[in-house]
Amino acid sequence: MSELMSKPRLRWACRRGMLELDVLLGPFVEQGYDALTLEQKHIFERLLASDDPDLFAWFMGHAKSKDAELQAMVQLILDRVRV
């Protein structure tokens, strides 16, 4: 697997330009990212490489990712936000 992004780069990658995504991804990096396994961290980085319209649809429940790992990460983030 490739090297992980640094925390500052992750913070920057979470700034999406859509408020709905910013309020989910930014706090997750600050409060939940460090608790992820190495594999989950790589999946999170793959999630951040997705297009904003796709992310919006997945997080708002309008669609599901065809990639089961990405969909599981979306659900993990949503579950963390609901706590």
Image (spheres, rainbow, N blue to C red):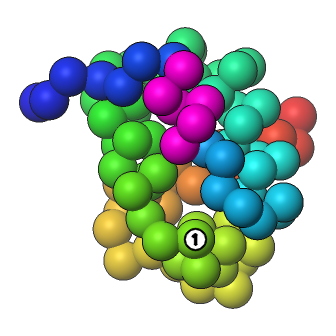
Q: Is residue 83 above or below residue 70?
A: above
Which residue is most to the top?
Answer: 34
Characterize the magenta stretch by its predominant secondary structure.
Answer: helix
Nearer to us in this view, 41 or 15: 15
Q: Position of residue 66 (x, y in %)?
A: 36, 77
Q: Is residue 70 above or below residue 23?
A: below
Residue at (73%, 20%) from the top-left corner? Answer: 31
Nearer to us in this view, 68 or 30: 30
Q: Number of labelled discs? A: 1
Residue at (69%, 85%) from the top-left corner? Answer: 62
Residue 35, picture quadrant = top right
Q: Magenta segment range? A: 8-13
- Specify whether residue 8 is in view: yes
Q: Secondary structure at mark 1?
A: helix
Residue at (33%, 68%) from the top-left corner? Answer: 67
As for residue 48 lying within the magenta part, the answer is no
Amino acid type assigned to the residue bearing label 1 in the image: Asp
Give the labeled residue for mark 1.
Answer: 52
- Specify whether residue 58 is in view: no
Residue at (58%, 71%) from the top-left corner? Answer: 52
Residue 81, picture quadrant = top right
In the displayed structure, does residue 58 sit left or right of residue 41?
Answer: right
Q: Position of residue 8 (x, y in %)?
A: 54, 20
